[in-house]
Image: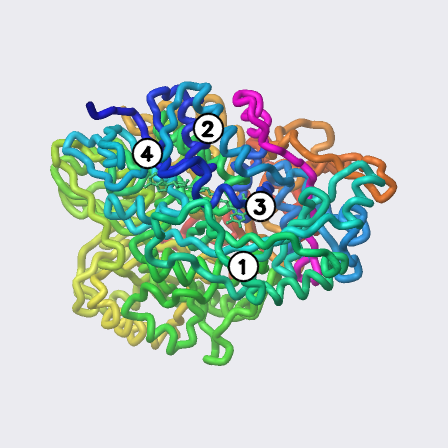
Amino acid sequence: MTRTYRAVVIGGGVVGCSVLFHLARAGWKDVLLIERSELTSGSSWHAAGGFHTLNGDPNVARLQAYTVSLYEELERISGQSCGLHLTGGVMMADSPERMNFLRMTHARGRTLGMETELITPSEAKAMFPLMDETQFVGALWDPVEGHLDPSGTTHAYAKAAKVLGAEIELRNPVKEITQSPDGMWTLHTQNGPIRCEHVVNAGGLWAREVGRMVGLELPVLAMEHMYLLTEPMPEVIEFNQSTGRELVGVIDFKGEIYTRQERQGILLGTYEKACKPWSPVNTPWDFGHELLAPDLDRIAPSLEVGFRHFPAMERAGIKQVINGPFTFAPDGNPLVGPVQGLTNYWSACAVMAGFSQGGGVGLVLANWMTQGDPGHDVFGMDVSRYGEWATLRYTNAKVRENYSRRFSIRFPNEELPAARPQETTPLYDLMVAQNAVMGVTWGLETPLWFAPSAAEAQDIPSFHRSNDFAHVAREVKATRDSVGVTEIANFAKYEVTGPGAEAWLDHLMTNTMPKAGRLVLTPMLNDNGKLIGDFTIAKASEGRFLIWGSLGASKYHMRWFEQHLPQDGSVTVRRFHMDLVGLSVCGPKARAVLAKLVDTDVSNAAFRFMDFREMDVAAAPCMVNRITYSGDLGYEIWMKPSYQRRVYTAIKAAGAEFGIVDFGMRALLSMRLEKNFPTWFAELRPIYGPYEGAMDRFIKPQKPDFIGRAAAIRERDEGPRRRRVSLVIEAGTADVMADEPIWARVGDTDYGTIGAPHGYGAPRFDAAGAEVAKPDPARDGDWRVVGWVTSGGYAHYVGQSMAQGYLPAALAERGEAGLFEVEIMGERRPARIALEPPFDPQGERMRM
Ligand SMILES: Cc1cc2nc3c(=O)[nH]c(=O)nc-3n(C[C@H](O)[C@H](O)[C@H](O)COP(=O)(O)OP(=O)(O)OC[C@H]3O[C@@H](n4cnc5c(N)ncnc54)[C@H](O)[C@@H]3O)c2cc1C
């Protein structure tokens, strides 16, 4: 008889075992893990076992901290040792630019309550005496780092899952997956069919193939990766004996090296530039507990730097070189969550740091499956963050780029070149011909700013204001003083039609739906009352609505829409993607430009702020919204791509007499800053409630029902714990990027902190062996870290450095000077809250 389970996890690597454990811990007993061979038959068995907390995405960092804190519980439940060595680790900077990066990482760490510390090269040498400290300018100490036994840890998850009631079946590959009309999945395994409600792809090295079993091409690729193990080294033995301690872990960015103690020797791994994909198209099913042939030539340049930085290593005998494959998504973060377009097919793959991230992945996936919500902000690892443009070859190019840059500095104004251009609009070549510096939004080329000449049309990567500064300033000024035009294809656009469309949208969105010919702005909440979307909605006619949102969240939102569609077919949602493109014309002369191109009355009386019209623009059928993100008089004009060149050319010609300029995304974002407008992904994310996000105007609790209403009312009645604010900063030559801590002079008043201390850190010792007292990273005299920055930059028209971020609600109305500081690259700069938008506080320009 066919066995039936509530959920089956495919893959017995560290990730699959973690998912199984978390499902069982969440109360699902009727769950099975099915493994092709033995546990750890993919990449898990030959991992170097390192773990750490730091990650460029603070939400992913939080989940890494969770993973590390889980190991003690796992050992307790399973009785199986994870072989934990919590040594702490140092990241070494060899240049001032890298030191800036470490300062920034340290400052961001405060936001998370991390206990990192900036230290000198000599202090680092005291913890890892094999280094030549003269090669470095500084270091960052992180106590929450170490290494473990990969196989023991995977088995600990598996045993703990079994203790909690889950089942594991070994030596039984899944060969095919089908779904019956009732939604149940059938896994066709070597030993016969197994039915289940939910299927989890934790196939690791074969995740791509397990995806293909249901017609998916997941953006995941395995890369070869090498580390070497030395014979016992006298320097290591001497350090262990004299201090009674183990060496700490070290990351040497310059050498693309990570290294740590392994027994009495050293383990040293590289992320070499000349990296190599493994099985780029098909992964062989007969690959088992095998290693790949070492290729020392490939890592020779890294070793050369390594030997210079750690001279004792050159004298050490190499005991073994491990070369094994493991998988990456294009941005190096996992692919987790329900797959859009499929019911109950869950992804838990592309986990490149299974021993830092596996616990977090298991936790959020189990939350999602058992409660309908991940319980954390996981967009950084959500499988929906990739669209159809992330094809096999795209993934190949991007994964290689990401691997080779694993230890490279990523500057905030840096756009990476691999796999470009992938998607373009019909204006692409016109924009490039006008010296546009292009960036990428969700695979699409988008103009960022316009240079005066082709030779100058490139960003100089920097943490400081860079070569675009004066040009973006010029674009903003010309637009605000007269008129500018920009491409806005990089919005998501949807059409909702059908007799049930209005009622359905009313149930999904917090705001009331507009009358025909009008627009509304509206957040969307999940059942817990957290922000999961922010849209502009137009009612075109009865039963027909247009929606604009974040392009990067296209699949994320489609997944939600599809999950909530009524079964009776009364509502249809269509995602346009690049079948609808757009142009935004803004500035005080925008109406004069539009009026020359239409036969419709676009006077302020006839075409009001927040109106929507379908009209011909330059003879092309278009939809026009009287609203723009610049916060100025302006229009968003939407058309089929086949008309875009025509409309653009006509706008430029009509605007010539007013000195119309092309402006890019950076100018648009600068203009929204001085209007205190929030952005999706930065200020508005699923960790915030609508009142926390200061979206009060767009929440209509008087509506009888909408998803998240009860939770939103609770948040309003209890008062939000924190609140979104805009800040004006006395910055130097650098503006904020994101995640910088906000300090406040609060003395002993406790407004609540936002950091989540790990409570799990390795002690640090000085050269004499004395334990170094832990600093409180969130306190300094009367000053305390009370909040964090979500985004910011330079507001060019008002000439101020600005940021948005979150503060405890009790501080959010305090507009006085001298109360706040924002830490930008290690320097605390005075800041004050902008209670009103610095540009046009009454919003008269939008309505003029
Ligand atoms: C050399 C090297 C060093 C590394 N160092 C570190 C490190 O220091 N720290 C760290 O965190 N990570 C490290 N990693 C990465 C780490 O190994 C991976 O993140 C982790 O193993 C991913 O685990 P997984 O469960 O996703 O995949 P895998 O370990 O690949 O497991 C997938 C499992 O699924 C099974 N499977 C696949 N298809 C089917 C099917 N159709 N039916 C049944 N079963 C199936 C496979 O047999 C396999 O057992 C390293 C990797 C390598 C190669």
| Residue with the mark numbered 4 | 510
- For mark 3, give the secondary structure: loop
| Numbered circle sitting on residue 694 | none
Q: Residue at the spot x=37%, y=32% of the render?
A: 170
Give the quadrant of the C terminus.
Answer: bottom left
Mark pair 2, 3: CA separation: 20 Å
| Residue with the mark numbered 1 | 294
| Sequence-first disc among 4 and 2 | 2
Give left or right: position of 100 versus 149: right
Q: Which residues are magenta?
A: 69-98
| Sequence-first disc among 2 and 3 | 3
Ligand 1 is within 8 Å of the C-beta of the residue at disc 2: no
Ligand 1 is within 8 Å of the C-beta of the residue at disc 3: yes
- For mark 2, give the secondary structure: helix
| Residue with the mark numbered 3 | 48
| Sequence-first disc among 4 and 1 | 1
Mark pair 1, 2: CA separation: 31 Å
Asked if residue 401 can be seen in this view, the reply is yes
Count residues near mark 1 (Cα–Cα under 10 Å), then give few for <14, some for 14-19, many for 20+: some
| Sequence-first disc among 3 and 4 | 3
Mark pair 4, 2: CA separation: 43 Å
Circle 4 or circle 2, nearest the eye? 2
Three-letter amino acid code at the position of disc 1: Pro
| Residue with the mark numbered 2 | 158
Three-letter amino acid code at the position of disc 3: Ala
Give the quadrant of the N terminus.
Answer: top left
Q: Residue at the spot x=40%, y=66% of the render?
A: 447
Count residues near mark 2 (Cα–Cα under 10 Å), then give few for <14, some for 14-19, many for 20+: many
Closer to the camera, 739 or 317? 317
Q: Residue at the spot x=51%, y=39% of the render?
A: 357
